[in-house]
Image (tube, grey):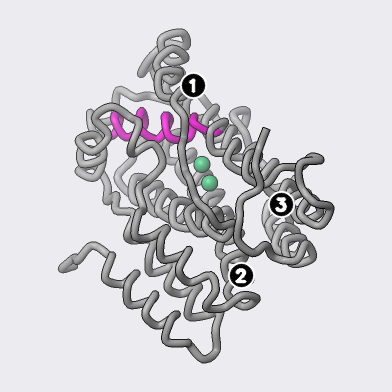
Amino acid sequence: MGTQVGGPLLPASQVDAAVTTFLRSGPATNRWDEFDFDWSQADAGVLTDGQRSAVEFITIIEDHLPGYFALYDTHFPVDDTVDRNVFVHNRELYHFSIRWAQEEDNHARVLARYQVESGMTTPDPLRDSLAVEGQKKFAVTYADAVQFFTYPLVQEKATQLYYQNLRQVIDEPVLAHILNRLSRDEARHFTFFADMLQRYLVTYGDAVVDPIRAVIADFRMPLADTIRGYWRWALKIADTARYDHTDAYEYLIKVLNRAVDTQSDKVTELVNFISACRTITTS
Ligand SMILES: [Fe+2]
Ligand SMILES: [Fe+2]
């Protein structure tokens, strides 16, 4: 049983508009799944150790979908525990979350199948090893609804950028094809969350600045707190292809700049804060 998260909600008509734009970006003719790949070409033998390790890592992250979906199911209940107007809002959001979940589950399935078809592992050991992390709770405790759109905005963009970077160093055709597909989906997911955040800023202005700031102040990628040896693994992954979630911050800043014509001091201060949180690079 869920408990409705606090903080202001967008009018249901605004959620509907964002959801409609999202659904239009993924029409039936563009959908894809595991049956679209020529698995006979999959060959992990041509991957480096680091590349194989990256595939294992992203499979675990994608496979945790039940935990991510539960966040929305829990914090935006679609039942009689909430007032009618909240239900109406949550019902609109559900049109997004159910499709998004289906797409993320597809990512998990395709990556797992890749591991098997390419010879990295066999189905039963893979299922068991995914269950080790899959059973751990994905605990994200935010007090404000807007934070449930801010966090995934960063996470989806960071994931998209990582898949693109990894794609650049992969010669194996099936994995390259998969990474292209994945990064395009993550880009669409990012766009939905960016649309929602922009609408929040237009509708509520300074009132949502502190909750957004809190997400960035405390940001960690999914499962960073639960995967054993996460940080060592993340560094190893970054050796293979650039992996830095703060690369996504410039996209968040763009959303902030776009949302308001004349920036208040509070929004300006938030933009400066987010800029300061970015990893300093010399390139
Ligand atoms: Fe995904
Ligand atoms: Fe995604």
Q: Is residue 84 left or right of residue 255?
A: right
The residue to which callout 3 is attached is: 93
* Residue 233 x, y percent position in the rendering: 24, 34
* Residue 182 x, y percent position in the rendering: 51, 44
Quarter occupied by the C terminus: bottom left
Residue 52 falls inside the magenta stretch: yes
Q: Is residue 66 left or right of residue 215?
A: right
Residue type for callout 2: Tyr
Q: Secondary structure at mark 2?
A: helix
The front one of 89 and 21 is 89
Q: CA distance from mark 1 to mark 2?
A: 47 Å
The magenta segment: 51-65
The residue to which callout 2 is attached is: 200
Q: Are marks 3 and 2 in contact (CB under 8 Å)?
A: no
* Residue 42 x, y percent position in the rendering: 43, 25
Q: Secondary structure at mark 3?
A: helix
Counting residues from the N terminus, which is met first, the one under dot 3 or under dot 2?
3
Counting residues from the N terminus, which is met first, the one under dot 3 or under dot 1?
1
Residue type for callout 3: Leu
- Disc 3 versus disc 1: nearer the observer: 3
The residue to which callout 1 is attached is: 40
Q: Is residue 133 left or right of residue 66?
A: left
Residue type for callout 1: Ser
Q: Secondary structure at mark 1?
A: helix
- Disc 1 versus disc 2: nearer the observer: 2
